[in-house]
Image (cartoon, grey):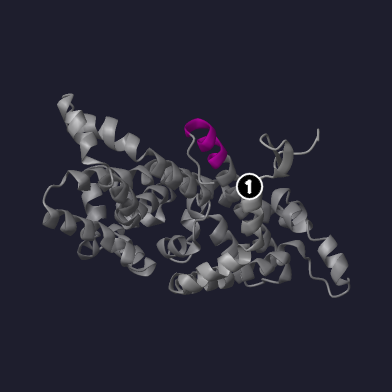
Amino acid sequence: MKGIGTDYLVLDKEHGIWVENPEQKVRDEVEKHYWRTVVRTILKDWRLYVMLVPMILVFLFWRYFPMYELLGSFKVEDSVKSVAEQYSMGFSNFKALLLGTGTFAKTSQDFWQALRNTFVLSFYGLCFGFPMPIILALFFNEIRSNAARSVYQVLTYLPKFMSTVIMTSLVIMLLRMQSTANQVGVVARLLSSLGIVPEADAIGGLLNKPQYFRAIYQISGIWETAGYDSIVFFAAIIAISPTSYEAAQIDGAGKWAQMRYVVLPSILSTIVIMLITRIGSMLSIGYEKVILLTEGNNPEVLTTAQVISTFSWQLKNAQNAGARNTGLASAAEMMNNVVGMLLVIGSNTIARKASNVSLY
């Protein structure tokens, strides 16, 4: 019986014969009734699966069905050519964006500027915006009064539940500064009086100066999302066993030492997972907030404010917009999404090799 796999037969030493492997018999039985078990499980927990229906519909209508529009980035519409020929020429949209010659030179320059601004804004958001929820969660954990902690958490969560229009309107009101003294923005007046910004820049409006846009965008983003994003980290912190704190206190660790040697190592896996997801959405900067802050793409600040989403929005809404503009806009968005996907794969691979913690 040499060569027979032990997955199927085993030697019965008592009788000296080969018999069917009991473990393989169990596996065969499980595979035979696999779908019956699946159906039985779904029927048993049908309420949980019904709750998944809204999420599935959201993904279908807002994530998968719109992918059909990506075909527009590979198509150059020409009534003279056949559909196959139009699609065969589709890579010309990517060529026009990346290399831009002739009539597409300006479009290519704007695309590279938008890509650079998108990356810079995302990188600043990762460096300054990602640590803030962790710091807030650590501070919330040190508040002993449950009532006080609840008040502080609600105050930090509140901006997230305001619409983008309201948030940007508040930022504009705080930073806008007109020549009339009665129309001075509070923050603009404070920064000017402290000498942080020149008075001339404050009078002209900080949002009209390209050198201030990135700082304003990041600070307003932290104000809006830091409190809400701290929920995940705070939940990980409160799940830490109290015995870990007690052991650290016995060893003479103070509050800062407990944060460094107990809290942070305990929530490291959560930090890594959230970091990977944050890197994946690095280049996904929505056009709404940028357009609202620049008050309709103010050309004075486009050198630092123009991002991929606003670049595509401009192409699609230009006065002479046509099929070619739509194709270029779709190509730009697709390239942006491909880069984001590569960032997720790369960061996940690095995290898995460095810390044995990964998203998948």
**Image-based side of 206 in relation to 332, left or right:** left
Picture quadrant where residue 309 is located? bottom right
Picture quadrant where residue 170 is located? bottom left
**Image-based side of 238 in relation to 336, left or right:** left
Residue 208 in the image: state x and y as whole percent: 40, 56
Which residue shows up at 45% across the image and 45% down it?
273
Read off the magenta span.
Answer: 347-355
Q: Residues within 10 Å of mark 1 (few under 14, many from 20)?
A: few
Residue 162 in the image: state x and y as whole percent: 32, 67
Which residue shows up at 67% across the image and 71% down it?
320
User: Which quadrant, please, contains the N terminus?
Assistant: top right
Q: Kindly tell me whether residue 265 is visible in this rendering.
A: yes
Which SS class for mark 1? helix
96, 320: nearer the viewer: 96
**Three-letter residue code for mark 1:** Pro
350, 51: nearer the viewer: 51
Most extreme residue toward the front is: 15
Q: Kindly tell me whether residue 54 is visible in this rendering.
A: no
**Image-based side of 311 in relation to 28, left or right:** left
Which residue shows up at 18% across the image and 33% down it?
246
Question: Would residue 10 be counted in the magenta stretch?
Answer: no
Label 1: which residue? 22
Residue 109 in the image: state x and y as whole percent: 64, 50
